Image (spheres, helix red, strand yellow):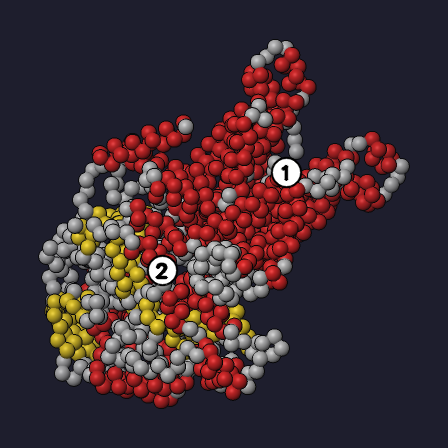
Amino acid sequence: MTVSALRRLAGMLLTTWLLASAVFLLLQAAPGDPLAALGGDFQSTETRAHLAQELGLNRSLGQRYVDWLNGLAQADLGRSYAYQRPVLEVILERLPVTFAIVLPALLGAALLGVALGFFAARAPHSGVSRLTAALCLLLFAIPVYWLAHLLVQGFSLHLGWLPAQGLRDLRAMHSGAAAWLDLALHLLLPICAAGLHQLAALFLIARTRIADEMRAPHFATAIAKGLSLGHAQWRHALPQAALSLVTLLGMRFAALLTSATLVEIAFGLPGIGRLFVDAARGRDYPLVLGVFLCVLLLTLLANTLSDLLCRQLDPRLRGAQR
Amino acid sequence: MRPQLHRFTLAIVLLVCHAHAIAQGKTLIVSTPADPQHLNPAITTASHTHAVADSLFNGLVALDREMRPQPDLAERWVVSPDGRSVTFTLAKAHWHDGKPVTAEDVRFSFENILLKHHARTSASLKGVIERIEARDAQTVVFHLKRPYAPLLQQLDVTEAPILPRHVYDGADPTQHPANLKPVGSGPFKLAEYRRDDAIVLVKNPAYFKPGLPKLDRLVFRVLPEPRAEVQALIKGEVDFVRSVAGAEIETLSRLPNIKLDRVTAGPGGGNCVMTMVFNLDRPAFKDVRVRQAIAQGIDRQRILRDVIFGQGRVAAAPISSGIAWAHDANVLAKLPFDAQAAAHLLDAAGLKPDASGQRLKLDIVHFPQFARYAQAMRQDLAALGIALESRPYDRAAMIDAMFTKRDFDTGLVSYCNGPDPEIGVRRMFASDAIGPVPFSNGAAYRSAEVDRLFADALTTTDLAKRGTSYRAIQAIVVRELPYWWLVETDSPVAWRASFDGFAPWRGQFAEGAFAR
Amino acid sequence: MRRPLHPAWLVLILMSLLAIMAEQLLPQAATARLLAPFSPPSWQAGWVGWLGSDDLGRSISGLLLIGLRESLLVAVGSLLLALPLGCVLGLLSAFQGTLAQAAERLTMTCQVLPRFFLAILVAAFYGATREGLILVLGLSSWPLVARLVRAETLSLLQRPWLIASRLDGVSPWRLAWRHLLPHALQPLRAAASTVFGAAVMAEAAIGFIGLGDPRYQSLGALLAQAFGLGPLLPWLACSAGGLLLGLILLVQWGLPPTDET
């Protein structure tokens, strides 16, 4: 177990290093001048030279790469050009917001999607089941930002129930428990906008998988032994289907981060997705690289976690080595 | 039904919470499109920094709607008869930490910070100011190398904010921790700065102007999506929006609880003219008739109507109508929109249409947000047989293509004239402004006569005499057309009618704002 | 084994044909000012005016056709890149040896590439071009294909008839070409559907945040334009968004995608 875990860890680090280096080179080879993006309207040649010196842009590529790797080994991602602060600090500030969208969205999508799939698989041809399926197909296909827009139009402008943007009520400035509730209300629409797509995807797959399992011989045996349909589903179809669902959940994490980015832009939330888009537009090389690395690690982590969970769920995989 | 019920419950809880919220007095929420990054307005010209930071500081003077100087930190001022020195008497103001604002602070701010790090101010004033003398605690004298008429227009909080010497002395102002924990003299103090989210300012109770500010809190909300901004305004989550998208104006104007205004200036610069730049180094533009043809082939009235939804004016002269004494209102009248005349000019220049009807292929570089101008121009020019290919570039790529590498045929630039032609017009035409400096003489236009006239205009502070020089310049550049001036753009401002008293043309727009 | 063509494919093919012939059907419609700005939908001007015009008097039906063409082009382009790459590397990684290991390592490495973030990065630093986007989407989608092909090949290699031909001394290359590839292609249909759908969505998202190719307005860019014009052009938002939604639904319907992404 430890050996395989170490192997996994080494594999993860190797992947990260390979991809991050590729992206480092990609950025360094890019045309355009980060200095021009930084300076003001009436930039002089002295300020440019000063900036280049300060940011270490006048050193050779190899030197910069070595420096960057060195920093990386000490968890130092460099300084952001635009923010003039350590990249790691800037990222850690934004990460909670992204998590506050992504984690509830993931959890909600998983629970609701699987629950709906569970019931839909019982009576695949009933009206409710078909309606749910059609709705989920629609939710799966609708672009996230359009969905976000429609949610805002409906729930906040038309009905006036939920805030249209932001993280908190800036006028009231609640404190204590009210502040948490305020935050939750502000996050509800963003979470829905980011999560509904995943919910739909999970529902569609959970339904097929559970229905597949229900056609398997062992399921018929369970029913023949006198288990109720629900009980048999719970004991004999769901656990089998759960395996592929957990794998899928890990795989969909990157897609969820994409949705979260679009949602952060639409609602003006300070998460890492929006940070990345802004940094890329402003040619803030260290920040772009840092956020990319962070997204990469999160994706890898999600995959690894879902793998480990699969091992827990499936005794056959326990102890098996890849 | 159940999720709906749930939302109802939430809505009720929300209402209860609202009732229980601690009433914190009058709060104004302003949306701003980008994070300010830091709050030191003296080291940058970036509009997103100034949009917030200008409310924390003061300039020596403030400008009124017509760009006339009014007292700010300086109570009064006297210009010497020879125009070579200006003596300011300071008001009795205090920094947010309680120390008094003195003449030393003014001298230090200029010599150590503004003339080194504020790009616009250092470009225009470094060659003008001989020295700054702090005569006593309340008196500061600017000694100039020559008379310089637009001096006072460049001393407001956007162009020359005054910083505390006791905080910044002996340190690098660009890296100073006080840039994030500013100590200013302005009507508001910083309470909380959450990056990319919100910046909370609170009333400065010891502000030196009696009765001001009237608001208790001024909150800036960073909202990059124009759509979200307007939705938040309608919903009442935001009270003040600077620079509303043109397409939203009509909707907003129909709402009784929203007020609209249009200003020609803002924290990024004033009196802006959307200008088409001809790269005069390109062989295609050696013949002035080609430039004339393009000028007459573009329907500027339509750009005003369809592209900016009427939020401005068709440019009547190279110099903005906002600088009335220098503006020559009739100089562009002889180049009306006339596709036929344009076609004749192209024929005369030897550019005959080929088999597919095409005469010329040009590209146009511009910021992505100006894409709709480029598309409208492309439609008009296509009718003339000129294929205009749009190249939308971000800031870095645009500066690189236009001012560093000069790899473009035509460009689209919003040249902000500022309060005086010396500030924002000279850079477009002077031959010493050709080079890698962003947003300088993009056309690479050279004329000894124009250079001489610009120098002439600076020898006196008499507006009538200066106006004559500037009108002469306009006559020449309209004849030679290194640029084509499309429209003067206003920025539409909207706020909720529950507030009033704004000065949206100033950096310090909310000093006198109040809640009804 | 042959099934009749799914109706969804008929519709998709029809849509592609319309999109390919966009310039012929409605010449200049996406650029020229053919109608008064903000014309409402009407039948009077024919197809050009069917959906009305946008803020600059361009025909919305023309814009939609061009947008559809762009979205399809990017999706098909990345598919054409991902499929062969995925097939070759997937087959390769099913065998033993250093090369196979390297192929598997590469697959595992590239499979975690966040394609949306990479696409933003390339568009921002190298210029937003359609070719660049196709390259990024294609190069980040092939691991899915490779994994499916590998899994299928591994299970095929256990089949008795294949073991028999291996024992007969058939060369590995011949084995791969004649016996494995035809069967391993089975999962490709589902993979193709997934890659295609994901590419359409990714392209739309990139277009929406304004990093799509400015020369050609895709459906995502059109949706962004409609949002930028706020309340003035509700029918542009609905038609561009609806078309995008329809495209993804059709692919889903015609070819159920795999569970993996």
**Within 10 angstroms of label 1, few (less than 14), some, or many (20 or more) residues?**
some
Q: Residue C201 location in percent, x, y?
A: 55, 47
Foreground residue among B89 and B486: B486
Q: Which quadrant of the figure has residue A50? A: bottom left
Q: Chain of mark 2?
A: B
Residue type at mark 1?
A: Pro
Height in image: A251 above or below B144? above
Q: Residue A272 location in percent, x, y?
A: 44, 46
Residue type at mark 2?
A: Gly
Q: What residue did someone put label 2 on?
A: B246
Q: What residue did someone put label 1 on?
A: C256
Q: Residue at x 31, y 33 (%)?
A: B11
Q: Residue at x 17, y 78 (%)?
A: B85
In the rendered image, which quarter contains the N terminus of chain B? Answer: top left
Foreground residue among B206 and B173: B206
Q: Is residue B484 left or right of residue C205?
A: left
Q: Residue A76 location in percent, x, y?
A: 45, 49
Label 2 secondary element:
helix
